[in-house]
Amino acid sequence: MTRIRWGAIALGAFAGLGLTAIIAVILFAFGVRPSGDAGGAAFVFVQFTGQVAAGWVAGRFATPTEAFHGSMAGLTLYAVTAALTLAAGGTPGIGALAFSAVVAAVLGAAGGVLAGERRR
């Protein structure tokens, strides 16, 4: 049975959130806004980057289950950002929320696998 390392998951999600925030601030400083097509695509890329980073950090601290813990960190980061979006008045549909959760799990797992490969 896999022992869940909550510290690795929390650290990964926190690192992913930090990276996402830093890149978003840089984009805002350059005048990129999420409302346009190009801006929306840029912020989706930022979110994906944060989820991979969350998985990578969690995977570095959770051997030999890097992919599992990376996936959980990606989902945790997604849950935080989805809650912030909803609190800010965003109205994504249930289908978009479910699809985004699956993408977050896959990207987080990919980050975890990358962390495991780096170690080997």
Image (spheres, grey):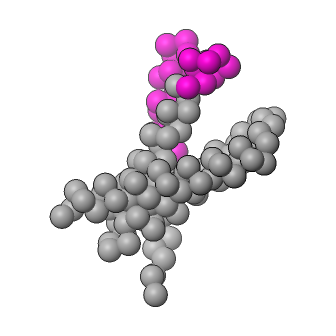
Task: Please state the horizontal and vertical placement of residue 64, each as a whole percent of the image.
Answer: 32, 74
User: Which residue appears farthest toward the bottom when viewing the image?
Assistant: 1
Left or right: residue 63 compared with residue 102: left
Along the line of sight, the residue nearer the viewer: 93 or 20: 93
Locate the C terminus and report the quarter of the image it occupies. Answer: bottom left
> Against 39, is 1 above or below?
below
- For the question of whether residue 89 can be seen, the reply is yes
Task: Please state the horizontal and vertical placement of residue 118, each as a whole percent of the image.
Answer: 22, 56
Q: Residue at x 38, y 59 (%)?
A: 112
- Magenta stretch, residue numbers: 17-41
Q: Residue at x 52, y 25 (%)?
A: 42
Along the line of sight, the residue nearer the viewer: 15 or 76: 76
Counting the numbered discs, the total is: 0
Task: Please state the horizontal and vertical placement of residue 27, each as a whole percent of the image.
Answer: 50, 21
User: Which residue appears farthest toward the left when viewing the image?
Assistant: 120
In which quarter of the view is residue 87 placed? top right
Task: Please state the horizontal and vertical placement of residue 23, each as a whole percent of the image.
Answer: 47, 30
Along the line of sight, the residue nearer the viewer: 64 or 9: 64
Specify whether residue 29 is painted magenta: yes
> Against 62, is 110 above or below?
above
Most common secondary structure along the magenta stretch: helix
In which quarter of the view is residue 31 placed? top right
User: Which residue appears farthest toward the top when viewing the image?
Assistant: 31
Specify whether residue 82 is painted magenta: no
> Against 8, is 82 above or below?
above
- For the question of whether residue 77 can be seen, the reply is no
Q: Residue at x 56, y 17 (%)?
A: 38
Q: Residue at x 45, y 66 (%)?
A: 69
